Image (cartoon, rainbow, N blue to C red):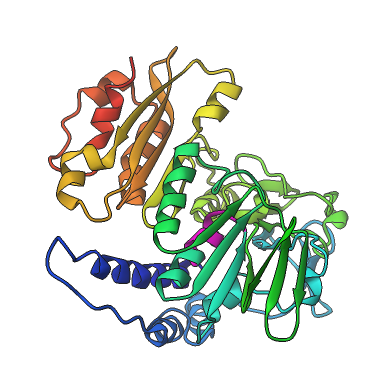
Amino acid sequence: GCVPSKMMIRAANMLAEARRLDGMAGHAEVTPEWKQVATRIREEATADWNDQAAVDRFTGKGGTLIRGWGRLAGPGVVVVNDEIFETRRGVVLATGTVPVVPPIDGLADTPYWTNREAIEAQTLPASLIVLGGGAVGLELAQVYARFGVAVTVVEAMDRLLPAEEPESSALVERALVADGITVRVGAPATAVRHDGTRFSTTLGDDELTAERLLVAVGRRADLTGLGLETVGLDETGSAIEVDGHMRAGDRLWAVGDVTGHGAFTHVGMYQAGIAIRDILSKPGPPADYRALPRVTFTDPEVGSVGLGEANARAAGITTEVGMAQVPQSTRGWVHKAGNDGFIKLVADADHGVLVGATSAGPTGGEVLSALAVAVHARVSIDALRNMIYAYPTFHRSIEVALHQIS
């Protein structure tokens, strides 16, 4: 769903931009057409959900593909379809994750959607309930709403994007409400029913109804059935524990979401590079997750890296914070329509470096790159203040936020 979902988001954002013309550049009447989006996903991104092109790339490099359920049968040994394979170097586990389905009364017996069905949809429902106010749920909620679907987001915790800064939660909620989305926070669902046509979702004394229900409360690693017990690992765990070189055991490596580091980020490719070097007996530096970046591709985008303010304080760091509002910047004033956002910097006052940052705004994910470098390389705040920032740019708000740190 990674690339297809971004195609959906791009299309929805184009609709939003056209609707912002009034008072800025003229007037436009916008008519959404979902068929164009669904066709592009099938024809350009997924070849109608056929992975043959990827298979051909792999086998063209000399690899062998076997389709089937594989399981470990001891160090360096894998069984697939009753055929035994013994490796010369080792095994890499890269099984990804599966959707979390909460134990809500009645939910399991209904035809609910996960992100897979929401992205595969060739026609849109008239209405949609989204269970989950994290990145996946909010991205898809905003897309569907901008294409005319009546959307309600339900989040059990007291704010959207609960893993992000509170300012990010407030920013995204304002944006979703402006798109016509109903937001319910602090409202856990207690029951779900489906009458053959519509879903009914119970929230305390309230009941919501919609044509479709999207479950997007998170993802988890499923370690059962991998044969981990044959190599001394626990299949009941939440993730596979690895060292800095992705080693999980004798002739065994693991990479990606199954390791529990950075779901929905590029960390899997980063880990794969580390594992490959180690497998080839050419180990490089171990994995470093201090500056793990992530982006929620709502509009405005929310990019984050490192520690949030609360986590930094909980870690015992003497914390200082710098804030700058994008609309008050020169580029934000020029941009005007759709310019909501902010820069938040979390500094370690004792050492004079950033330990975390959030970049929210029209290009929040792109602006994040500068902050990710600063956190990863432990660039001093003095050095960051002494930089020359291009003008007028969104990233120049970083300079303003730096001067809010004493």
What residue is at 68 percent from the left and 85 percent from the top?
197
What residue is at 20 percent from the left and 51 percent from the top?
336
The quarter of the rendered structure image containing the C terminus is top left
Residue 359 lies, with reference to residue 374, above or below; the image says below
Foreground of the two, 88 or 252: 252
**Residue 285 % position (x, y):** 50, 38
Q: Which range of residues does the magenta coloring cover?
A: 132-140
The verdict on residue 138 being magenta is: yes
**Residue 78 % position (x, y):** 78, 67
What residue is at 40 percent from the left and 54 percent from the top?
175
Foreground of the two, 118 or 292: 118
Q: Quadrant of residue 329?
A: top left
- Can residue 255 be seen from the camera position used here? no
- Can residue 223 be seen from the camera position used here? yes
The verdict on residue 135 being magenta is: yes
**Residue 251 % position (x, y):** 72, 53
